[in-house]
Image (cartoon, rainbow, N blue to C red):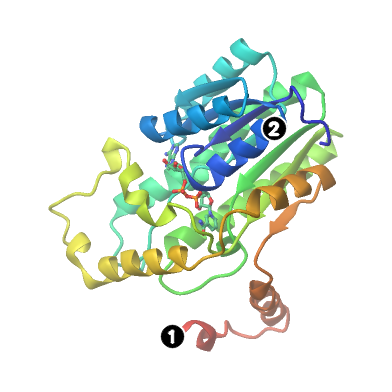
């Protein structure tokens, strides 16, 4: 996709972090911008920013873990703008801790936001794009956590490996039918966003249960602390939107932003192919 002016972009998780950056880039490129987020106030803030940049905008409070809400987002996009050209399935959250300690509710929340969020976006928007038969692009936000594994992030890795697989497999299917829809999977390392404060985005049904001892545990508290540390010391966000839009223009499928992880990704695959066991020494620190 190389033409952006007057085209329609839809961005989930647009209230903060990457979603807000993508919205700003879309506005700068004179696109019509449909922004969605579970947080109404954060969404209003993004709406104000992109409107001030001169973009025609539609803001819809959406919980991506609920298919009917994503379907409504797609329907309202078509009602208002008549088409959709660029989709960012970007909303996401993070959960830390070992599988034997994590309450099932944590899994339901993160799978709902990070995996079902993408499934819902693909299911609601791809039929519209196929019918249009115009050059379109879909960017799914995964993570470098979808290309490697570390300790204590089992739920996040599981969702991000799923996001990579969802994107790769869908892309094969679309290319097999000669569709004009191109795809990318965005796999950054740590970047300074609001991700470490994602507990505040829990829908009512996934709110922290005060009777659940896990939330008083050392593992839970250590996970929160580490989240603040790695996000606050991550890459500044400024350059991200240019990298992602360059990838869209170049039809680049994998968008990696942190070359320091390439060795680890490569070693994982090399060990696998050579019949070696995972190198646990890399992550015991
Ligand atoms: N920041 C990083 O270091 C990093 C690294 C790799 C991947 N990612 C991924 O990038 C994506 C965006 O994260 P970010 O870092 O910009 O975080 P962020 O917290 O700054 O922004 C995420 C946005 O998603 C929204 N959201 C959360 N759950 C939602 C739901 N169910 N429905 C709709 N909106 C919802 C939040 O309200 C928030 O505005 C996520 O998928 C995240 O996993 C982030």
Residue beneath disc 2: 86
Residue beneath disc 1: 285
- Please give the name of the residue rendered at 67% of the width and 50% of the height, measured from the top-left corner: 185
Q: Name which quarter of the figure residue 248 lies in.
A: top right
Residue furthest to the right in view is 178
**Residue 278 sits above or below residue 76 on the image:** below
Quarter of the image for the C terminus: give it. Answer: bottom left
Residue furthest to the left in view is 211
Q: Say if mark 2 contacts mark 1, CB within 8 Å.
A: no
Residue 115 visible (yes or no): yes
How far across and how far down the image is residue 278, in percent? 57, 82
238 relative to 181 in the view: left or right: left
- Does mark 2 have its CB less than 8 Å from ligand 1? no
Quarter of the image for the N terminus: give it. Answer: top right
Disc 2 and disc 1: Cα gap in Å? 41 Å
- Please give the name of the residue rendered at 54% of the width and 20% of the height, measured from the top-left corner: 58
- Please give the name of the residue rendered at 49% of the width and 33% of the height, measured from the top-left corner: 46
Q: SS of the residue at dot 2? A: strand
Rate crowding at label 2 as few (under 14), some (14 to 19) or many (20 or more) other CA atoms within 10 Å: many
For the residue pair 126 and 235, the one nearer the viewer reads as 235
Query: Which of disc 1 and disc 2 is earlier in sequence?
Result: 2
How far across and how far down the image is residue 6, in percent? 74, 22
How far across and how far down the image is residue 13, in percent? 49, 39
**Residue 276 sits above or below residue 191 on the image:** below
For the residue pair 105 and 248, the one nearer the viewer reads as 248
104 relative to 91 in the view: left or right: left
Q: SS of the residue at dot 1? A: loop
Residue furthest to the bottom in view is 281
Rate crowding at label 1 as few (under 14), some (14 to 19) or many (20 or more) other CA atoms within 10 Å: few
């Amino acid at each position: 996709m190389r033409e952006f002016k007057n085209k329609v972009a839809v961005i989930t998780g647009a209230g903060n972090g990457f979603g807000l950056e993508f919205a700003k880039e879309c506005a700068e490129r004179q696109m019509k911008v449909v922004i969605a987020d579970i947080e109404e106030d954060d969404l209003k803030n993004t709406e104000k920013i992109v409107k001030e940049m001169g973009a025609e905008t539609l803001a819809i409070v959406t919980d991506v873990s609920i298919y009917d809400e994503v379907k409504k987002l797609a329907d309202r996009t078509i009602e208002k703008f008549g088409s959709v050209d660029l989709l960012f399935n970007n909303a996401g959250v993070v959960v830390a801790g070992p599988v034997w300690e994590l309450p099932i509710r944590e899994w339901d929340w993160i799978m709902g936001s990070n995996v079902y969020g993408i499934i819902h976006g693909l299911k609601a928007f791809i039929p519209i794009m196929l019918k249009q038969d115009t050059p379109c692009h879909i960017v799914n936000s995964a993570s470098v956590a979808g290309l490697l594994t570390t300790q204590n992030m089992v739920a996040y890795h599981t969702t991000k490996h799923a996001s990579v697989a969802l994107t790769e497999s869908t892309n094969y299917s679309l290319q097999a039918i000669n569709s004009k829809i191109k795809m990318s999977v965005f796999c950054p390392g740590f970047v300074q966003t609001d991700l470490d404060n994602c507990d505040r985005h829990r829908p009512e049904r996934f709110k922290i249960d005060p009777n659940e001892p896990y939330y008083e545990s050392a593992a839970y508290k250590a996970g929160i602390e580490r989240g603040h540390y790695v996000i606050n010391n991550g890459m500044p966000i400024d350059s991200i939107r240019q990298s992602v839009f360059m990838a869209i223009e170049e039809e680049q499928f994998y968008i990696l932003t942190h070359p320091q992880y390439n060795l680890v990704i490569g070693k994982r695959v090399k060990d696998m192919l050579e019949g070696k066991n995972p190198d646990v020494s890399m992550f015991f620190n």
